[in-house]
Amino acid sequence: MARRRPSDRLQQVIDAAIEVFIGKGYRRAQMSDVARAAGVSQGSLYNYVESKEALFYLIIDRGFTDAPLPAGLKLPVETPSLADTLARLRVRIISAFALPELERAFTRSSVADPRAELETIVRQYYAGVERVGRGLDLVERSAVDLPELAQLFYIERRRSLIAQLAKYLESRIEMGAIRSLPDVPTAARLILETVVWFARHRHNSPDSAMISKTAALETTVDFLVSGLLASPAPTTSAKPKENPQRSQLHASRKLQ
């Protein structure tokens, strides 16, 4: 039987560590748990990482990308400071949730096709959430134990995205492309949370197996976009439909 290459073994350790940290959280996850899940000795883990903190840094990085491990990765990975870990997470989140259509929307003084613009924004966000689902599960679970992580993930990054999306909605409301909303920031939050549930959290619900990947995406996009767009103004030339019963009553009165 061929021996595993070091890079293969490291990927095996990373995959196991991600599942352990998602399942147990940061505080309760132990190196022994990871070794057991990866099928290696606990001592061998230290050939790859110096500490639990170094392992967490490594899996945060890998949880947000499917790219191959860097060829020149120095092992064992040194123990980072918490600031280094947070900085790396910030880079990964910003990269994962790049919304180029939203950025382009802010450069436009008018929009020819509001539906296409809004639909593209929703689809880009949905794709980002779906692509890095494991990374997000890892961060959300670990944020329970690390207040600094929660501050970055929920307060800094999510609120920033809500503010950016709310600014976009307000600009399109002023253009008449999107209907008036009771509270714009809440509407922005609703968009984000709806996408997150159907792109990620539905997988953790025991009663969502009947929802296919395509159905989840297309239904989410259709409901959000259709619910936000302004209704087209009625044409002045259109005449109201005549009620047949009222017409008959009016005719009988004339005959009397």
Image (tube, helix red, strand yellow):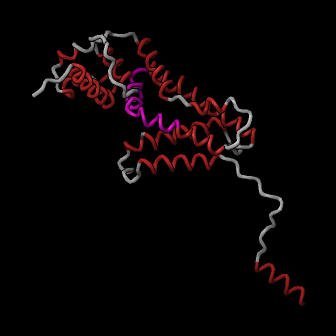
Residue lying furthest bottom in this view?
Answer: 256
- Examine the image and state in which quarter residue 175 appears: top right
* Magenta stretch: helix, strand or loop mostly: helix
- In magenta, the rendered stretch is 124-146
Work out whether residue 1 or residue 163 is closer to the camera in this orientation and state it: 1
At 37% across and 10% down in the image, what residue appears?
80
Horizontally, residue 155 falls left or right of residue 175, namely: left
Position of residue 33 measured from the top left corner of the image (x, y, whole percent): 22, 25
Position of residue 54 measured from the top left corner of the image (x, y, whole percent): 32, 14
Work out whether residue 147 or residue 10 is closer to the camera in this orientation and state it: 10
Position of residue 214 measured from the top left corner of the image (x, y, whole percent): 44, 49
At 39% across and 32% down in the image, what residue appears?
137
Asked if 128 appears above or below 229 in the picture, the reply is above
Residue lying furthest left in this view?
Answer: 1
- Examine the image and state in which quarter residue 142 appears: top left
Work out whether residue 240 or residue 26 is closer to the camera in this orientation and state it: 240
For the N terminus, the quadrant is top left
Asked if 224 appears above or below 162 in the picture, the reply is below
Q: Is residue 159 magenta?
A: no
Horizontally, residue 212 falls left or right of residue 229, namely: left
Horizontally, residue 22 falls left or right of residue 188, namely: left
Position of residue 27 measured from the top left corner of the image (x, y, whole percent): 32, 22
At 55% across and 31% down in the image, what residue appears?
99
For the C terminus, the quadrant is bottom right
At 87% across and 85% down in the image, what residue appears?
253
- Examine the image and state in which quarter residue 120 appears: top right
Q: Is residue 135 magenta?
A: yes
Number of marks in the rendered image: 0
Work out whether residue 10 or residue 247 is closer to the camera in this orientation and state it: 10
